[in-house]
Image: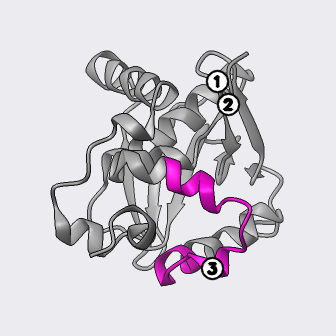
Amino acid sequence: MESLIQISKINDFLFCPRSLYFHSVYESFSDVTYHASPQVRGRLNHVTVDTGTYASEKKYLQGEEVYLEKYGLVGKIDLYDKENKTLIERKSKISVVHPGYRLQLYAQYFALSEAGFPVERLVIRSLSDNRRYEIPIPEGEELRMFEEIMERMRVFNIADAPLEENLAKCRGCIYQTLCRPL
């Protein structure tokens, strides 16, 4: 089998495909070396689900590792409510539901479904303001977009990736010093 893609890297790839490469460069380093405050905050928000201490009710699966054979994806879910058949992805603060957020949730949905868990609802939750964003089950155009992005990630080559045209986006990128010193 080809190498696996981490579900958490989908959002990075959509932010900037080049970040997929730089993420792998830094992977063996301590997070402190390259994470900015949003990444640190996100990591801290995941501690409770990753350790299974977010909720004590048995109806929740939390921080479970998932594998999606069909697309060669691996990662973790945040929360799955077995009673309500709801998959929940938590983000620190959401001002816009970015496509990367949806695609990460789709990957988790497909992995849980492939493993035999019935999922009827998808939710992205903003922790800072406790807002919930209902996301439709992927089909049609959303499914095609997901599959296209998975294929683009699979064949990605840094040598073929153009530099981002939006310099403001580059200035805010944690990989900016390696990718494009400004």
Q: Secondary structure at mark 3?
A: helix
Please rate how many residues cluster around mark 1, counting C-alpha atoms within 10 Å: few if below 14, some from 14 to 19, many from 20. some
Would residue 54 be counted in the magenta stretch? Answer: no
Side (left or right) of 156 relative to 47: left
Label 2 belongs to which residue? 4
Mark 1 or 3, closer to the camera: 3
| Residue, disc 1 | 72
**Residue shown at 48% from the left, 34% from the top:** 106
Identify whether 41 is placed above or below 114.
below
**Region of the chain picked out in magenta, as a range:** 21-41
Question: x, y (%) of residue 26?
Answer: 63, 62
* Res 132 → quadrant: bottom left
Name which of mark 1 and mark 2 comes first in the sequence.
Answer: 2
Give the SS element for disc 2: loop
Q: Amino acid at mark 2?
A: Leu
Quarter of the figure with the C terminus: bottom left
The disc at residue 33 is 3
Above or below for 99 versus 118: below
